[in-house]
Amino acid sequence: MPAIRLPRTSRPISRQPTKPAPSPDWHDLRAPNAWLLMLEGRAPWEYAALLATLPWMRKLPQGDGHPVLVFPGLGANDLTTAPLRAMLDSLGYATQPWGQGFNFGPRAGVLEQIKADLQALYRRHHRKVSLLGWSLGGIYARELAKECPELTRCVVTLGTPFTGHPRATNAWRFFELVSGHTSNDPELMEAIRKAPPVPTTSIYSRTDGVVAWRCSVNEPSALAENIEVQASHIGLGVNPIALYALADRLAQPEGQWKHFEPKGARRWFYKTPTQPE
């Protein structure tokens, strides 16, 4: 079985100078400031809001039973996605955690295992699989969909930095420490920022204290969209507003995907920008 790999898989950290990246508008993006980073402390309140809105959450669009493979963020494990997966299971989806412990980057065997998991889910359910990734987990979801579009129904990412400057986050040093890879690889980023050839949604927040929000904005297309919510980075996976958008996206009938269009009072809670600002 050929192994999945990130395009030109992240190189080990080297002291040799790297070739400078092209100079698009976002080249000088910086990580979120200290104030936004401090606001990440509101994540427990977002979880409390989820508990308080459980009766409302039961009215979310119901799923059709198709499988959903869920990837956690950098330094996180399946425990962090448990509330999210529990909600999706209650809506009728067949969720599966990534099952590889803590996510410390694309270490040996990680990418091969997620491809094997996708193939096994497809064989078991005889249906295409939706891929859901939080932060770094969204990179896995996007790249896996590019490798196996025939097995993938859609991709949804939560606060995933797939474009912009590779160090426009407050986590790049931690990534390099635990993964052994450099975060500043212009050629790799050029490949990663291309959206998969399947319906792809990025859910992000301008008040993200970890990832510069412009790093999570897709180039709009017939199959790619962006949904802005008010949330912390750490709280995106338990934020009721983000979870409603996620449920709406996963409930789209296969082959009939349409861009997100909040109606009525929901328009107060979402923005669907067409271009980065």
Image (cartoon, rainbow, N blue to C red):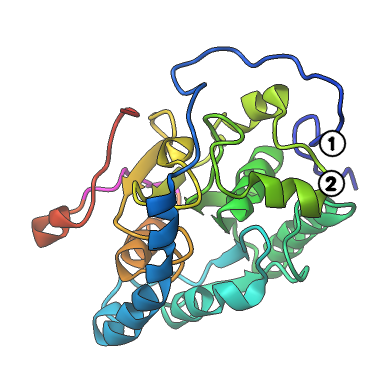
**Residue beneath label 2, please?**
180
The answer to which quarter of the image holds residue 10 is: top right
Give the label on residue 277, or none. Answer: none
Where is residue 144 shown, x and y percent of the image?
A: 68, 46
Q: Report the residue at 75% width, 31% height from top.
A: 7
Answer left or right for 1 relative to 222. right
Q: Amino acid at mark 1?
A: Ile
Q: Report the residue at 71% width, 69% height from top.
A: 124
Answer left or right for 119 relative to 74. right
Q: Amino acid at mark 2?
A: Gly
Say what secondary structure mark 2 lies in: loop
**Residue beneath label 1, please?**
13
| CB atoms of marks 1 and 2 within 8 Å | yes
Residue sitting nearer the eye, 107 or 274: 107
Q: Is residue 59 above or below residue 219?
A: below
Residue bounds of the magenta highlight? 255-261
